[in-house]
């Protein structure tokens, strides 16, 4: 005969089992990839540097009282006339390249994230409306999406910036217009799958309002692919902004980004002053690759059909 202690032991052991929450499972699955974890750490460091650029940058590279033209185009590791050491050298205007890169990273990430947020909001709303109402509404919306996606994104952005002009707000608006169609197509495809399920039909039979069905029932089930596309499109927006600034149609000199810093040093490449463009280019590459690696891991984790 089993003693009372032996009978109680399995019950006590079962009570100690912790229930794994969905968020815990998500974090565990994401951290399984060392590459994605490293990319997330690097991305976190870059975001921290961008947010606290005035506090961590050695100097303000756009303060005329600090910058001296006598210190222009100095190679990495040299000292200025005031005894300040430039770890990565200076550019053609005498600005410390480390400080200029930190401030440029701030604008590049800011433009990419802000344009991505607004483009996601607009595209998700349009995609939900197209999938939910269908018929003529869906045909009109998707034909507009198809027409926009048939043109290269950089061509559309160039045309818009030729009309709007230079500036952070101008290029953000241009990138929003360029990106919203990608989100609309993604959300529409996911919402079409959810549109014919029982819970949507039940909500319709209960005469629940269209807005509530769209944003409280359809949208939450479309979030996994939307988050993945959002990370990829953010990296795409940063690279597109850098390309436009390199071409001289993106940001003015007073509002630098990594692309503009690369453009400023391009004229000095043939004279051997490689560092002016090289180091901002490396920073831009690390930023885009980190975001893409995080997005790839999110795609694997959020898609249950993929075998990790």
Image (cartoon, rainbow, N blue to C red):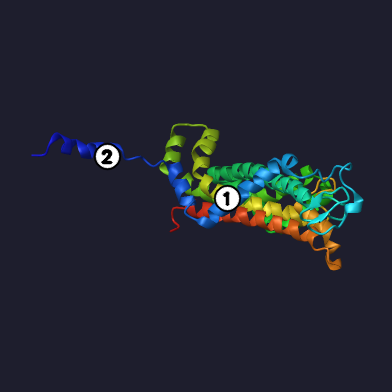
Instruction: Determine the secondary structure under disc 1.
Output: helix
Task: Tell me which residue sits at (46%, 51%) in the image.
Answer: 29
Q: Residue furthest left?
A: 1
Task: Tell me which residue sits at (77%, 42%) in the image.
Answer: 169
Task: Tell me which residue sits at (47%, 54%) in the image.
Answer: 32
Question: Who is closer to the viewer here, 304 or 255?
Answer: 255
* Label 1 Cα neighbours within 10 Å, binned few <14 / some 14-19 / many ≥20: some
Residue 167 is drawn in which quadrant? top right
Question: Who is closer to the viewer here, 187 or 5?
Answer: 5
Label 2: which residue?
14
**Chain-order first, disc 1 or disc 2:** 2
Q: Is residue 118 visible?
A: yes
Label 1: which residue?
40
List x then y, in percent, for residue 41. Answer: 58, 49
Q: Is residue 188 visible?
A: no
Task: Tell me which residue sits at (46%, 42%) in the image.
Answer: 23
Q: Residue furthest front?
A: 83
Q: Is residue 290 left or right of residue 272?
A: left
Instruction: Determine the secondary structure under disc 2.
Output: helix
List x then y, in percent, for residue 37. Answer: 54, 52
List x then y, in percent, for residue 178. Answer: 70, 51
Cα distance in 3D space between marks 1 and 2: 36 Å
CB atoms at circles 1 and 2 under 8 Å apart?
no
Q: Is residue 26 left or right of residue 227?
A: left
């Amino acid at each position: 005969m089993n003693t009372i202690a032996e009978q109680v032991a399995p019950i006590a052991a079962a009570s100690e089992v912790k229930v794994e929450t969905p968020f815990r499972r998500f974090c565990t699955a994401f951290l399984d990839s060392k590459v994605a974890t490293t990319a997330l750490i690097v991305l976190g460091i870059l975001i921290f540097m961008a947010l606290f650029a005035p506090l961590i940058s050695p100097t303000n590279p756009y303060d005329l009282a600090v910058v001296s033209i006598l210190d222009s185009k100095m190679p990495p590791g040299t000292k200025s006339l005031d005894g300040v050491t430039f770890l990565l050298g200076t550019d053609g205007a005498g600005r410390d390249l480390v400080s200029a890169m930190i401030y440029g990273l701030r604008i590049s990430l800011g433009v990419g994230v802000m344009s991505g947020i607004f483009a996601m909001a607009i595209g998700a709303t349009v995609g939900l409306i197209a999938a939910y109402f269908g018929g003529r509404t869906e045909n009109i919306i998707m034909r507009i999406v198809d027409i926009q996606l048939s043109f290269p994104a950089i061509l559309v952005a160039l045309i818009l910036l030729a009309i709007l002009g230079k500036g952070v707000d101008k290029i953000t608006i241009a990138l929003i217009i360029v990106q919203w169609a990608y989100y609309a197509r993604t959300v529409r495809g996911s919402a079409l799958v959810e549109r014919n399920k029982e819970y949507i039909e039940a909500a319709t039979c209960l005469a629940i309002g269209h807005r509530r069905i769209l944003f409280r029932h359809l949208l939450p089930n479309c979030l996994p692919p939307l988050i993945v596309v959002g990370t990829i499109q953010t990296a795409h927006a940063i690279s597109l902004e850098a390309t436009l600034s390199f071409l001289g149609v993106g940001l003015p000199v007073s509002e630098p980004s990594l692309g503009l810093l690369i453009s400023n040093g391009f004229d000095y490449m043939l004279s051997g002053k490689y560092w002016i463009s090289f180091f901002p280019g490396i920073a831009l590459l690390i930023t885009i690759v980190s975001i893409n690696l995080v997005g790839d891991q999110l795609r694997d984790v959020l898609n249950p059909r993929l075998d990790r």
